[in-house]
Image: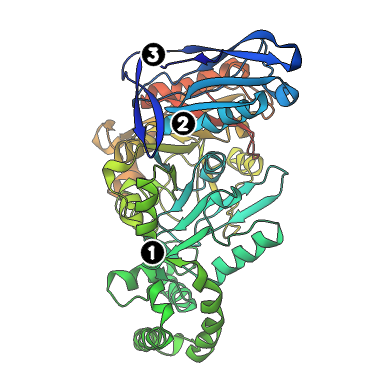
Amino acid sequence: GPAWVGACGGFTRQRNGTREWEGGTRKGKLKRLSIESSLARGKEGRGMRTRMRTRMGTRMRTNTVLNLCSVRRGGQPKRKDWSAGPSVETRVVLGGRRIEAKASASEVAAKIEEEEFSEVGQICAVLGTQWGDEGKGKLVDAMAQTFDVVARAQGGANAGHTIYSPDGTKHALHLMPCGILNPRAKCIIGNGCVIHLPTVLGEIGKLKEKGVSADGRLFISDRAHVLLDLHKEVDGLREQELADKKIGTTKRGIGPCYSSKAIRNGIRVHDLLSFDVFEKKLRGLVAENEKRFGADFEYDVDEELSKYEGYIAEIKPYISDSVEILYNEQKSKSRILIEGANATMLDIDFGTYPFVTSSSTTIGGVCSGLGIAPNKVSHVVGVAKAYTTRVGAGPYPTEIHSDLGDAIREAGGEYGTTTGRPRRCGWLDMVALRYACAVNGFSFMNITKLDVLDKLPEVKIAVEYRLPSRGGETVKYFPADLDLLEECEVVYETLPGWQTDISGIRTYEDLPQNAKRYIERVEDLLDIPVRWIGVGPGRDALITK
C-alpha cells in the first residue's frame, strides 16, 4: 500500500480546500530524511521497495524547510533514469506541501525538482550586495521556474540581466523580469520602477521572435513612472555640467525620471490612458527644462507625442493594478519571487553616495516598490560575486590596478549588459559585504562566478579597513564619508587557489578542496550560509550547498 511520510512530527490543516502537512519544529539540524514508497511493476504486481534520501537545510528558519537535493534509487543516483520507471503511489511531504498522487516515477522526480527552492518560503527577494552585475539574473532565472509570480520592484533599463534558455538561447533583459522564461509565471514591473516604453516593447518583440510570449503574463503597474527620451537628454546635460566630477551614469534618464517623481511633476503609467492628460504633462516638462537648460536642450515634443500614440496602443494591454494583483496572489498562497536591480552599494541611501543609482535597491525598496508588507517577505537572498566589480566613477577600495584586474575582466566577461562599458575589477570585499548583510538581513547567500578565479595561484579576501592617519585604527563599519573611504588601507587574507576548471562540477562535494575552503571562509566571515554557488553562465551551472 502507499507509504505515509511525516516531517519532523507535523500537523495537518485545511487551506483553500487542500489538506497540507507541515513540519512542526523550528529547532535541530536534521541532515537527511528517508522516504519509502511502494512501487508496483506492471501486470505482475510484484512489490519493490525504493528508498529516496533527501537533504535538508541545516538552519530551520520556518516550520517547513525541506530542500530536496538528491533522490536515490537502489542506493545510486538514478533520477535521470526514471523516465520509463514504474508507477508510484505515494504521499510525500515536500517543502511543507503534501503531495498525494498516483503517477509515474518521472513525475514524482519532476515534483521534487520543483521543490528545490522551497526553503525560501512563499515570498522571497533576491538582491545584489555589491555594485551591481553580481549575476542575480542567473539565480532568479533558476528559481523563477518554481515560482508563480516574478516581480521587479525598482530601477529601469539601467539594469541588465543576461540569462539563458534551457536550449542555450541568450536573452539580455533590461526591464523584463527573468521569470518571463517560465511560461507559467506572471511577471510584474512594479510601481517603484521607471518605464521606458520603447525599451519594454522592444524586449517584448525580441522575446516573441525567440518563441517567448509576454501576452497575458506581463503586468506593468499603473503607478510606475514613465521614463521619456526627455529624461535621457536631461541626464546627458547634467553629466556635462559636472565636468570632471561626473557620476558616471548610464545616461538612460533614470536619475531625471526619479527627480520628476520626487518633485511631483512626473508622468505615471495611468496617465497614458488619457492622451490629453499625457500631452499636457509632457508639454509642461518640456517647458520647464527649456527654462533650465536653454538652447542646449533640444527636444521635439510633437515628434515624441506622435511616437507615443503608437506606443500607448501597444502597451495598453499590459497596464494593470499591480498592488491588487500581488495582494490576491498572496491570499491565494502563490509563491512570489522579487528580483532586485542594481545593488546595495548603489542604493540612494546606503550606497557610495553620490556615486549611486536613484532608487532604493535594498529590502526597503522591495516593499515600497511593490506594495508588499515587510512582514510578508519570507526570506531575502544576497548575491555576491566571488570577486567584485563596479562600473562608472566612485570609490572602490579593493580594485586591482594591474594586469591581473584585466585578466579577471576578460575571464569573467566583465562588460556592462546595458552599456558595454568595461567593469573595474577587484577582490571580494567583506567589509562592504557585511554592511550589505546588515542592511538587508539576508537568510542565504549566492556566490557567483567562482569559476572565473580558476586559474589564479592565490585569491584574496578583504577582511578589514584601516586608517593610517589615525595610527592604523580599524574602521569597523563601511563609512558614509567617501573621503574617509578613499583614505582607507585594505587588510587582506590570502588563500591558495585551486587552479582547476570547475565549470563542469555540479555538486559541492566535487569542488576542489581549496575552492570549498574559500566558500567556507566567506561563510565564517559573514555568519550566513552560502546556499548556491555559480560556476558558469548556464542555468544548470549552479551548485546547491
Look at mark 2 in the image and give the residue it sits on.
118
Closer to the chain start, of discs 3 and 2, is 3
Assign a secondary structure to mark 3.
loop
Residue at horizontal 50 percent and vertical 27 percent from the top: 99
Residue at horizontal 52 percent and vertical 26 percent from the top: 100
Q: How far is mark 3 from mark 1, CA to CA? A: 42 Å
Q: In which quarter of the image is the N terminus?
A: top right
Measured as percent of width and height from the top left, residue 45 is found at 71, 11
Is disc 3 in contact with disc 1, using a CB cutoff of under 8 Å? no
Q: Would residue 87 appear left or right of 119 to someone viewing this image?
A: right
Closer to the chain start, of discs 1 and 2, is 2
Residue 392 seen in render:
no
| Tag in front: 3 or 2 | 2
Q: Would residue 340 appear left or right of 208 to someone viewing this image?
A: left
Amino acid on which disc 3 is placed: Lys
Look at mark 3 in the image and give the residue it sits on.
29
Residue 102 occupies which quadrant of the picture? top right
Measured as percent of width and height from the top left, residue 148 is found at 49, 45
Residue at horizontal 29 percent and vertical 53 percent from the top: 349
Q: Would residue 90 appear left or right of 376 to someone viewing this image?
A: right
**On screen, 290 above or below 138?**
below
**On screen, 108 above or below 372?**
above
Q: Residues within 10 Å of mark 1 (few under 14, many from 20)?
A: some
Look at mark 1 in the image and give the residue it sits on.
321
Amino acid on which disc 2 is placed: Ser
Q: How far is mark 1 from mark 2, CA to CA? A: 28 Å
Assign a secondary structure to mark 1.
loop
Q: How far is mark 3 from mark 2, CA to CA? A: 17 Å
